[in-house]
Image (spheres, rainbow, N blue to C red):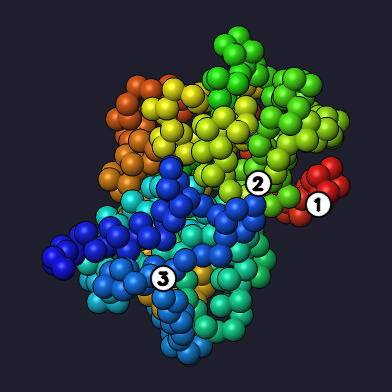
Amino acid sequence: MSRLSRRELIRRSVLLTVGTGIGSLLAACGGGGDQTPTTAQSTTQAASAATPTPQPQVSPTAATEAAASPAASPETGAWDDVIAQAKHEGELVLYDGHGGALPSIGFAAEEFSTDFQIRVDVSTMRASEALERVRVEQQSGQAVADVLTVGPTTVYQMLQDDFVQPVGDLPGLERVSQDVWVHVDALGAEYRENAVWEALQFYGILINTRLVPEGEEPRSWRDLTDPKWRGQIIMDDPRAIGGGNYFFTVSLKEFGREFQEALAAQEPVLTRNIADSTNRVARGEFAMMVPFAFGLFAQVRDLPTVKVIIPEEGAVFALHGISIPKTVRHQNAARAFVDYLLSDKVQRNLAENFLRPAVDAAMEAAPPDVRDLLSATLWGTLTDPTAVQSVIQVAQEIYPE
């Protein structure tokens, strides 16, 4: 067997977890429900990833001491000390709660590992599962995750249960666009303090151009209730935290319950596997996917059978971020990684994958087709994380099991 380069080993380790089932395009969650995550092991273990390995454990005392280390300022060389200590720690465990639907997370893990010689172990799952795993780890004193991807709802729940720590003063934060901060600050100061928000995810409608003739595309979100689309819609499940719930929340506020009841009468197929849903629309199994995360479009844009529609009301959008649990084993590596998501390299990759990067320079450097799509009018987003559970209850009433 030929000797693989270290970069290739890293790439394979990350892709084994982030890309499970990209198969035809991407992979995310297990079919129709929350995915059982596959945790990447070390780069030398990647080739045998099919053999499960026990999660590492740490004593509560050691973990608490690691988390309690003072947050270093990026000034006067202190940030260099953080990087040096991160390299000494040599490892980072990342929970990707986007379910593999954000390719840039895998890219960031691979590049960070290469640039800093720090092994990155990635587990992909839905946001609800990532949150629950971290909650159990923090309550038991057996910390595993050093960082996890988050949205406002996840941060809210971590704050409520007191198992998130402030990200501290990071060099990259001064580069974040005011266009992003305005949405963060609308949630409250604690959302600025306890996460790094690296991008905005936009949601529209993905159509199969062979099943939706030109001129018959939905112009408004309301057009989804047209009887001709009955049985032809696949929809991200609004009963779980994710894009489907964002769409449900915004449309419930703007159109009222009647709209969602009319949409439910269309008998949409509910899914929690948005990557597979993209494939199914591309193959012609469904006429459209609602809502469609723009971050998946890079995987299908060259196919002649698909097209993204931005309804006249605008795109639903969501803040994408990353947080550090209160107790972690690799404190410095965690801080180095969350800052790395604001680097030019990662921000450009986010834009290339049709996410609105937090740094304006990356947006300005994006290809014209990307800038055009990301210049969409914004319809709405989640503005009250405290109301998520009550909204989910309404979704469960309208879309019973």
Q: Which residue is mark 3?
A: 50
Q: Earlier in the sequence, mark 3 or mark 1?
A: 3
Image quadrant containing the N terminus: bottom left
Q: Residue at x 56, y 65 (%)?
A: 36
Picture disc at residue 271: 2
Compute the Cα span from label 1 to label 2. Answer: 12 Å
Q: Is 337 drawn above or below residue 210 in the view shown? A: below
Front residue (pair 228, 200): 228
Q: Which numbered disc, 3 or 2, marks the residue closer to the eye?
A: 3
Picture disc at residue 272: none
Kind of residue at badge 3: Ala
Q: Are marks 3 and 2 in contact (CB under 8 Å)?
A: no
Q: Is residue 134 left or right of residue 22?
A: right
Residue 401, image x, y percentages: 81, 52
Q: Which residue is mark 1?
A: 401
Q: Residue furthest top?
A: 215
Q: Residue at x 52, y 83 (%)?
A: 142
Q: Is residue 282 left or right of residue 139?
A: left
Q: Is residue 63 left or right of residue 344?
A: right
Q: Residues within 10 Å of mark 2 (few under 14, many from 20)?
A: many
